[in-house]
Image: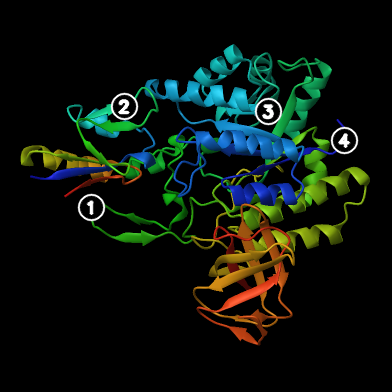
């Protein structure tokens, strides 16, 4: 099947900074979770029920769609909270809920809230798609399918004219970028069994990402496994096969990473936005791909591979426990004042130092993520070569600066 | 007497405290989070004095809590 319209770029949002970054980068839609009923509950500054209305309004103002994730395992005691969240979702006009549990699916049906089937439902064949079609408008396929399997499913949807609950043709969404699990589409119990911290309640401790030894229990001899990180796959990156992804009939491209920063959200969303448009316009070239790949390696990543989409049976494993990003950000300080007439922001440096010519990054709920090189440095009102702890630096800034805006220095 | 301190707002409603020590805990039907019964609230933190014999079990629960929001002092 050949796609002629640009697919929807769906960006992850775990904070208001990321929301603005996604908007600035040209996302068509965003997804977020609230309280404890989503797959990223360990966030230090979680989005709450009270924020749903604000997010809906902001997304509507920028003409992008907002989806709420409600895709954890649901217990009996969660049902009231679920109803409270869905009531708010309905009132705020959030565009859809993303779910896997039948309680959520049923409640959305009763309350007439549009529904997307989460990857947690592991949909891997056309019969499962047909099963979910009368309940939903979008189905997120399991991340372990090959593109051939994906295109077989989309071709069957067209051939059989399978339509979603809204009466429109059912849409297929896949993950195109971000972290992959060692387990099938997130169905993992390692964190639960070892640390009683359930991944399926959004509390994954990611202990699969560490190196392990094998011990002979009789002799106590320990063997270190040659490739240390045998349970930690590299991150998914499909920017170099995006033409194949789009030609497989996928209409929504999802980026993983609600726990990641606004710089990650901005860069990934922007790259995939440009790449998807290039595929549709016929300007998708190797040179451009190299450019996007360089950009993507600058932000959080564990090294890249194309996942299972091209038919690989065994994953590629990471080489280190943390990020392999080529750029590192160092926290310098936060916003302290704003001069709206001159559009100048003032930041107070709390740690480290900044030199003329350094690249800085500002993240905040109003600006999202802004990165620029400071050719001129105003320190405490005067031109200077360097700023240190306690200094106030000023530079032109388009949006209002508050204490929520954080200033970083980018180093290679 | 030992005290349980519960930082309730970070609870993810995993159920382990109630499962292991139903005398002290309930899962709220309203918001799905665990509630420390008869506790005194100070700025969102819940505190309850408990007898020494119960503290050992609560300490294991504190270790099991996936989000580390239960302390026994």
Residue under numbered circle 2: B27
Report x, y in % for residue A10. 70, 40
Q: Chain of mark 1?
A: A
Residue under numbered circle 3: A95
Q: Is residue B3 left or right of residue A284?
A: left
Residue under numbered circle 4: A5
Between the residue at mark 4 and the residue at mark 2, the CA separation in whole angstroms equals: 48 Å
Residue under numbered circle 1: A218
Local SS, label 4: loop
* Residue furthest out toward the right: A282
* Observer-nearest of A218 and A323: A323
Report x, y in % for residue A58. 68, 40
Between the residue at mark 3 and the residue at mark 4, the CA separation in whole angstroms equals: 21 Å
Q: Tell me which numbered mark, 1 or 3, is placed earlier along the sequence.
A: 3
Determine crowd level at label 4: few under 14, some 14-19, many 20+ residues with C-alpha closer than 10 A: few
Vertical placement of residue A104 versus A110, above or below: below
Between the residue at mark 1 and the residue at mark 4, the CA separation in whole angstroms equals: 62 Å
Q: Tell me which numbered mark, 3 or 4, is placed earlier along the sequence.
A: 4
Q: Are marks 3 and 4 on the same chain?
A: yes
């Amino acid at each position: 099947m050949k796609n002629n319209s640009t697919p929807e770029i769906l960006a992850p949002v775990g904070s208001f900074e990321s929301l603005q970054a996604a908007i600035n980068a040209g996302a068509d839609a965003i997804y977020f979770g609230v309280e404890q009923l989503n797959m990223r509950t360990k966030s230090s500054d979680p989005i709450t029920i009270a924020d749903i209305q604000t997010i809906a309004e902001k997304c509507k103002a920028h003409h992008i769609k907002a989806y709420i994730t409600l895709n954890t395992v649901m217990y009996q005691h969660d049902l009231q909270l679920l109803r409270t969240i869905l009531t708010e979702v309905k009132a705020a006009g959030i565009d859809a809920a993303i779910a896997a549990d039948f309680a959520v699916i049923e409640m959305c049906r009763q309350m007439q809230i549009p529904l997307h089937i989460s990857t947690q439902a592991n949909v891997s064949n056309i019969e499962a798609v047909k099963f979910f079609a009368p309940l939903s408008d979008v189905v997120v396929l399991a991340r372990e399918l090959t593109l051939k399997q994906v295109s077989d499913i989309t071709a069957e949807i067209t051939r059989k004219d399978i339509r979603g609950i809204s009466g429109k043709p059912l849409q297929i969404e896949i993950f195109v970028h971000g972290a992959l699990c060692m387990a099938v589409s997130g169905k993992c119990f390692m964190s639960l069994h070892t640390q009683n911290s359930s991944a399926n309640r959004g509390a994954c401790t990611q202990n699969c990402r560490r190196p392990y030894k094998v011990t002979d229990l009789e002799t106590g001899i320990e063997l270190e496994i040659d490739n240390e990180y045998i349970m930690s796959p590299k991150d998914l990156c499909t920017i170099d096969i995006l033409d194949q992804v789009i030609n497989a009939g996928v209409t929504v491209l999802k980026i993983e990473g609600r726990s990641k920063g606004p710089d990650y959200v901005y860069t990934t969303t922007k790259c995939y936005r440009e790449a998807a448009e290039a595929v549709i316009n016929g300007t998708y070239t190797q040179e451009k791909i190299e450019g996007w790949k360089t950009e993507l390696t600058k932000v959080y990543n564990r090294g890249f591979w194309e996942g299972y989409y091209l038919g690989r049976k065994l994953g590629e494993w990471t080489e280190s426990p943390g990020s392999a990003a080529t750029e590192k950000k160092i926290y310098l300080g936060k916003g302290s004042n704003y001069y709206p007439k001159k559009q100048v922001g003032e930041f107070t440096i709390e740690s480290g130092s900044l030199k003329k010519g350094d690249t800085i990054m500002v993240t905040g709920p109003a600006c999202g993520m802004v990165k620029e090189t400071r050719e001129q440095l105003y320190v405490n009102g005067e031109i200077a070569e360097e700023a240190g702890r306690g200094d106030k630096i000023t530079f032109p800034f388009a949006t209002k600066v508050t204490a929520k805006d954080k200033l970083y220095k980018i180093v290679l | 007497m030992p005290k349980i301190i519960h930082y309730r707002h970070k609870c993810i409603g995993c159920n382990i405290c109630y499962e292991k020590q139903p005398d002290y805990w309930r899962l709220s039907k309203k918001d799905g989070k665990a509630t420390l019964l008869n506790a005194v609230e100070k700025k969102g933190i819940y505190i309850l004095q408990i007898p020494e014999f119960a503290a050992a079990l609560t300490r294991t629960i504190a270790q099991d809590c996936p989000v580390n929001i239960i302390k026994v002092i």
